[in-house]
Image: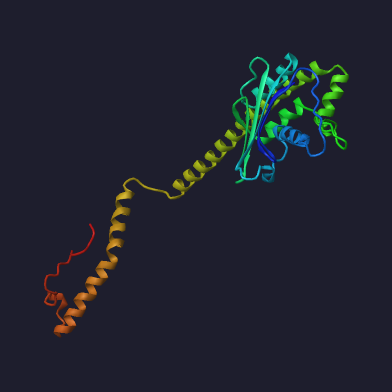
């Protein structure tokens, strides 16, 4: 049951702490007394959509906190659900919920002190609380809740839990199989790549010592541009001197050397 509720900066409420008694609790009051604010706070703590227009004028942050005490059968259900989500379990049958949202749009939820998503908070709320109104009945519109009611009516709760365990094992095996399949595909890709590389090497018909001749040819090709520049420089120098005596080496430019600028 709901043990306590604290509301801060929700519509007209600045700070309200409400301790509920055991058994049935009834809130009465005339129209406008604030009964709907209590219901709205419960909606928020159960994961309903938050509108920044609900924040009290002049405040930047709205917070709703609730403490619930659970019976042992429900504690087991809630703790199993929290464990699946990686959240802290209930201690001594006590569940703590907190939700805050700001005018800037930040929205934070906590379950037993651990950060949680809004969807997680909503899923906990669906297990814990059933809201009744003049025009709606939440749980009967939920297919999951309908199945739970049907299974409980048929006395199949034990079989459902066993099926859930088997389904979890099946999902684990599917995940492991998918990982192995991906590994096989990666291995196949690597084999294909290596096969292609080996085929390219064989088609090149490389010979022992061929790397040295290739290196020498590369050096010659690398010097081709420089040799052309030097030859043009020599021809230009000889034309300026008017002496067609290139073969006697008389047209060299001052300071010129045949190996100048060449790469070895």
Q: Residue at x 60, y 43 (%)?
A: 60
Q: Relative to 29, is 223 on the left or the right?
A: left
The location of residue 28, given as percent across then percent down, is 82, 30
Front residue of 26/140: it is 26
Q: Relative to 213, is 175 on the left or the right?
A: right
Front residue of 169/8: it is 8
Residue 114 vertical placement versus 12 (above, below): above
Residue 250 vertical placement versus 143 (above, below): below
Q: Which quadrant holds the C terminus?
A: bottom left
Q: Residue at x 55, y 40 (%)?
A: 189
Q: Residue at x 25, y 68 (%)?
A: 227
The number of numbered discs placed on residues in the rendered structure image is: 0
Front residue of 53/91: it is 53
The location of residue 199, given as percent across then percent down, is 49, 45
Q: Relative to 46, is 139 on the left or the right?
A: right
Q: Residue at x 14, y 67 (%)?
A: 257
The location of residue 139, given as percent across then percent down, is 82, 30
Quarter where residue 151 is shown: top right
Quarter where residue 107 is shown: top right
The location of residue 103, given as percent across then percent down, is 62, 45
Residue 210 vertical placement versus 44 (above, below): below
């Amino acid at each position: 049951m709901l043990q306590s509720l604290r509301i801060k900066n929700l519509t007209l409420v600045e700070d309200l702490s409400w301790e509920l008694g055991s058994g049935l609790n009834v809130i009465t009051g005339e129209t406008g007394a604030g009964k709907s604010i209590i219901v709205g706070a419960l909606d928020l703590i159960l994961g309903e959509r938050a509108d920044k227009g609900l924040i009290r004028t002049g405040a930047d942050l709205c917070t709703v906190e609730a403490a619930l005490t659970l019976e042992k059968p429900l504690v087991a259900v809630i703790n199993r659900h929290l464990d699946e989500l990686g959240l802290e379990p209930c201690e001594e049958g006590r569940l703590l919920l907190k939700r805050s949202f700001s005018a800037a749009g930040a929205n934070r939820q906590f379950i037993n002190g651990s950060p949680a998503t809004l969807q997680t908070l909503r899923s906990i709320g669906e297990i814990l609380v059933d809201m009744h109104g003049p025009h709606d009945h939440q749980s009967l519109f939920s297919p999951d809740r309908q199945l739970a009611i049907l299974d409980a009516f048929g006395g199949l709760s034990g079989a459902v839990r066993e099926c859930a365990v088997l389904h979890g094992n099946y999902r684990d095996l599917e995940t492991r199989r998918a990982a192995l399949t991906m590994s096989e595909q990666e291995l196949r890709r690597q084999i294909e790549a290596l096969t292609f590389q080996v085929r390219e090497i064989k088609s090149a018909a490389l010979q022992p010592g061929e790397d040295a001749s290739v290196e020498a040819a590369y050096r010659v090709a690398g010097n081709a541009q420089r040799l052309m520049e030097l030859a043009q420089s020599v021809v230009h120098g000889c034309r300026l001197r008017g002496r067609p005596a290139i073969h006697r080496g008389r047209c060299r430019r001052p300071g010129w050397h045949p190996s100048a600028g060449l790469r070895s």
